[in-house]
Image: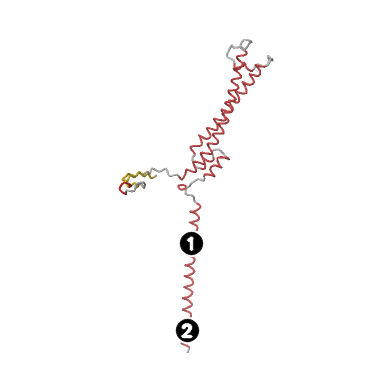
Amino acid sequence: MKQNITYILKTLALAAILLSFATTAKAQTAADSMDVSFTSIKADSVYKVKRDWSTWRPNPKRAMWLAIVLPGAGQIYNRKYWKLPIVYGGFVGCIYAMRWNNQMYTDYSQAYLDLMDDDPNTQSYNQFLHLGAKIDESNIQRYQTLFKKRKDKFRRWRDLSFFCLVGVYALSIVDAYVDASLSEFDISKDLSLKLEPTIINDNRQRNPFKANSLGLSCSLNF
C-alpha cells in the first residue's frame, strides 16, 4: 500500500514538473511571438512614416493654393527649384519697371504742370532740357506737347508693368498646378510603332470577296 502511494506521489510530482516546463515554454513562445509581432508592427509603422521620394507625386490643388498664398511656394512643393529664379526674377523685373516708369511719369507730369503755369519759380522742367537749351515763347508749344506725350507714355508703361506683374503671378500659379498634374504623365522613351497586315471590311458590299480587302494597320504605343 505504501509503495502504491509513493508511486502515485512520484507520478504526480513528475507530472507537475512536466506541466511547469510546458507552461514556461509556452509563455516564452508567446513572448517571442509578441516580440516578433511588435517588431514587425514597428517596422511597418516606420516604413509607412518614411516617404519614398522616388514614387512621391505632388497634389495639384495643394500646389495651386501654395502658389496663390506665396509666389514660388508651388514650385518648391513640386521640387522644381530651378524655376524659382525665373519666377522671382519676373517679379523683381516687373516691380522695378513699374517703380521706374512711375517715377518718370511723376517727374514729367510735374514738369508739364510747371510749364503750363505762369509762375517763374516753378521750373522743374529744366532737368529734362539739353545743355544750353532754354524754353521761350518760340518753342514753348513744342515742349508742352513733348512733355505731355512723355508723361502719357510713361503712365502707359507703368500700367503695363503692373499687368505684367499680375501675369507673372498668374503664370506661376498655372505652372504649379499643371506641373503637379503632369507629374504622373509617362515621359519615358519606351515608344513602339507596330505595323501588321489587317483585313478591312466594307459592309456596303454584298459580295464577300469585294467587301473584304487587305490593308496595313499602324499602332503607336507610348
**Mark 2 highlights which residue?**
8
Marks 1 and 2, the one that precedes in the sequence:
2
- Comparing marks 1 and 2, which lies closer to the viewer? 1
Crowd around label 2: few <14 · some 14–19 · many ≥20 (10 Å): few
Crowd around label 1: few <14 · some 14–19 · many ≥20 (10 Å): few
**Residue drawn at (48%, 62%) of the image:** 37
Asked if disc 1 and disc 2 are in contact, CB closer than 8 Å, the reply is no
What element does badge 1 sit on? helix
**Type of amino acid at the residue the image marks with label 1:** Ser
Residue 174 position, x and y percent, is 52, 39
**Type of amino acid at the residue the image marks with label 2:** Ile
Q: Is residue 65 above or below residue 24?
A: above
Residue 117 position, x and y percent, is 68, 16
Residue 213 position, x and y percent, is 31, 45
Q: Nearer the viewer, residue 192 or 196?
A: 196
The residues tagged by marks 1 and 2 sit, at their Cα atoms, a distance apart of: 43 Å
Q: Using residue 24 as the reference point, say whether residue 166 is left or right of it.
A: right
Residue 105, visible in the rendered structure: yes
**Mark 1 highlights which residue?**
37
Which numbered tag is attached to residue 81?
none
What element does badge 2 sit on? helix
